[in-house]
Amino acid sequence: MLDPVKLKADFPVLQQTVHNGVPLVYLDNAASSQKPQIVIDTLSRIDSTVYANVHRGAHWLSDESTALYEESRDAVAEFIHASSSREIVFTTGTTGAINIVARSWGDANVNQGDEILLTRLEHHSNIVPWQQLAQRKGAQIKWCDITEDGCLDLEEFENLLSDRTRVVACTMASNVLGTFTPAKQITQLAHEAGAIVVLDAAQAIPHQAMNVLELEADFVAFSAHKMLGPSGIGILYGKEALLESMPPFLGGGSMIDVVSEQGFTTAALPAKFEAGTPPISPVLALPACLEYLTQIGMENIHQHELELASYAHAQLDTLGKVNILGPAPSEKAGVVSFTVDNLHPHDLTHALDNQGVAIRAGHHCAMPLHQRLGITASARASFYLYNTRDDVDTLVQAIDKAIRLFS
C-alpha cells in the first residue's frame, strides 16, 4: 500500500497554508491534480536545456527536443499498452481528442438517419461534439439512462443498440458520480452492432491500470493534467487502421508531406493529426509523471482511493443532512459528490474554502446528469494518491461547521 503522508511531501503546492494560516486540503483532483516536484523540475530542466521546436529544425537542439518528444509518445504507448506509438496522437486535451474523432471519423462515416449512442453520465466534452456532428449530418442522438444508484443501465444500453448505431461514446468513470462503466462489455456489444466505441478515460486512467488492447475500444481520450502532469496536453489513442482511414481535422504545418498550389498530401501517422507547433515542454514532461505513477502502482492508487471514498461515505453519513450521490465506493473512483439539505453547493464550497478545504461545486460540466438526478448543482470532493484520512476528517468537520453556520 502507498503512504499518502510521504507522497504529499512530493507536492510543493500542498505544503501551503491559506486564509491566515489554515493548512490547504486539496480535494478537487477530478478537475486537475497537482504536480510532484519531479514533474516541476522536469519542466524547468526542459525549458532550460533542450527546448526547441520539434520535427522541423536542422540543428542539435531541435534534434534533442524531437527525440525526447517521440520518447514521450513511446512512454504513453507503453503506459496504456498500445500496440504501436503510431496510435498515440498528442492533442490539446480530452476535449480536443474527442473533437478530432467527431470531426474526422464522424464527418466521414456518419450520415443522415444514423444513430449516436451516449449515456447520461457524460461530461459535456463527450456530449457537445456528438451533438454538433448530429446537427451537421442529420443523425440522431440516443441516451442510455442510469439506475437509481447511479450505475449505467446495461440492459437499456443493449436495447438501444441498433443496425443504425454508428458511434457509442461513453465515459469510463463519471466525473460527477465516480461511477465506473463496464467499458469492455460496452465495447463488445457496440462492436457486435457494428458501431465504433469512443471512451472518455479522463477520470479513469489516472486511477487504475489501462490496457487498450484488452479493452478493444476504437478510440480512448484522456488528459495529462488529471494524472500529475502539465495542462494543455491530451492524448488520443486510436486503432492504427482507423487513424489511417481518417482525413486530418486541422490543417497547417507538420501534418503535411507535400504542399503545392494544387493541393497537399498528408504526413504519416500520427503527424497528420498534429497540426502546428505542439505543447512541447508539457509533452516532454509526460514520462516523468507516468514513471511516478508506475513506481507507486496503479492498483495501489485504486485501492487507496477506494479506502478514502469508503471512509468519506461513513463519516459524511454521521452528519445526517448530507445526501451522497451515486453508487457505493466499490463501484466508483475516488469521487464523492453530495448535496446538503437547505444549503446551496456554492455557499457550502465558499464556507469550506474559508476553512482551507478545496472542493468543487456546480454542474461539473454534466448538466444532463444533474437534470436526471433532479438537482441543479452538487458539491464534489475528489481524492488522489496524496490525500489522507486526516483530509477526509477535515472535510467532514468543515461541512459540519458550515451546516451549523447556515442553520
Image (cartoon, rainbow, N blue to C red):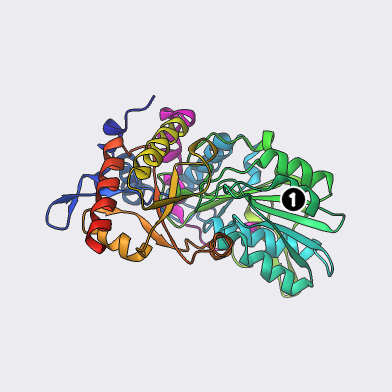
Q: Quadrant of residue 107?
A: bottom right
Name the chief secondary structure element in magenta.
helix
Q: Is residue 276 above or below residue 84?
A: below
Task: Answer above or below: position of 292 versus 114.
Answer: above
Task: Judge left or right: residue 114 versus residue 390.
Answer: right
Residue at the far left in the pictured view: 20
Comparing 47 with 134, the one in front is 134
x 26%, y 57%: residue: 402
Residue type, mark 1 in image: Glu
Secondary element type, mark 1: helix
> In the rendered view of the protein, which quadrant contains the C terminus?
bottom left
Percent x, y for residue 195? Answer: 79, 51
107 w.r.t. 187: above or below = below
**Residue 308 horizontal/vertical position (percent):** 38, 36
Q: Is residue 247 visible?
A: no
Point out residue 303 in the picture as x, y percentages from the top left corner.
45, 30
Q: Residue 287, percent across and down? A: 45, 39
Q: Which residue is mark 1?
A: 156
Q: Nearer the viewer, residue 407 or 69?
A: 407
Residue at the image position 39 percent from the left and 24 percent from the top:
1
Q: Is residue 277 magenta?
A: yes
Density class for disc 1 (Cα within 10 Å; few <14, some 14-19, many ≥20) is some
Q: Which residues are magenta?
A: 273-300
